[in-house]
Amino acid sequence: QVQLVESGGGSVQAGESLRLSCAASGTIFSINVMGWYRQAPGLQRELVASIPSAGSISYQASVKGRFTISMDNAANTVNLQMNSLKPEDAAVYYCYADVVTWPGRPSRNYWGQGTQVTVSS
């Protein structure tokens, strides 16, 4: 029904930047929220940043001031600009979207396949 395709992961040195993008496609009536989670080996998946279609953007405290999330509502895409990357930012990053597929239906979350971000010191 809804597919999320991520791009932009890779390997960088500490202090460098990466930009992640995620495009949602399929049966989409509206999107309430899009955002990014990450999961490092042995750790739980954690919220990095989220951006609602209306409302305030949220960031995990550890990325505030370094990461910027943005959303193109018309294109159903969300981007995550990651600057001043640290080794502790290394993880698999997952895009998600809370999507209404049809008027009157409840929204549900959809997930991308994940993209690897590696940061070496």
Image (cartoon, rainbow, N blue to C red):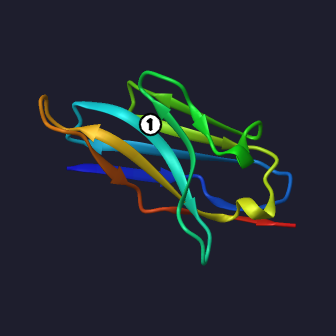
Picture quadrant where residue 116 is located: bottom right
Q: Position of residue 2 (x, y in %)?
A: 26, 48
Q: Nearer the viewer, residue 50 or 78?
A: 50
Location of mark 1 (residue): 77
- Tag count in the figure? 1
Q: Residue furthest bottom?
A: 42
17 vs 98, left or right, is right
Which of these two is toward me, 75 or 88? 88
Q: Quadrant of the C terminus?
A: bottom right
Callout 1 secondary element? strand
Residue 115 position, x and y percent, is 54, 61
- Residue 2 against residue 76 in the figure, above or below: below
Type of the residue with mark 1: Thr
Q: Residue at x 82, y 51 (%)?
A: 16
Query: Residue at 35% across / 32% down in the picture?
Result: 32
Q: Is residue 71 left or right of residue 59?
A: left
| Name of the residue lying farthest toward the top | 54
Horizontal and vertical percent for residue 95?
47, 51
Q: Say left or right for 117 vs 21.
A: right
Q: Residue 77's spot in the image, x, y percent?
A: 44, 36
Task: Judge whether 114 appears above or below 74 on screen.
Answer: below
Q: Nearer the viewer, residue 14 or 11?
A: 14
Q: Which of 89/79 is in front?
A: 89
* Residue at the image position 47 percent from the left and 45 percent from the top: 22
Could you tell me which residue is drawn at 60 percent across and 78 percent down?
42
**Which quadrant would residue 52 be assigned to in this image?**
top left
The quarter holding residue 58 reads top right
Q: Is residue 18 above or below residue 67?
A: below
- Few, some or many C-alpha atoms within 10 Å of disc 1 (few <14, some 14-19, many ≥20)? many
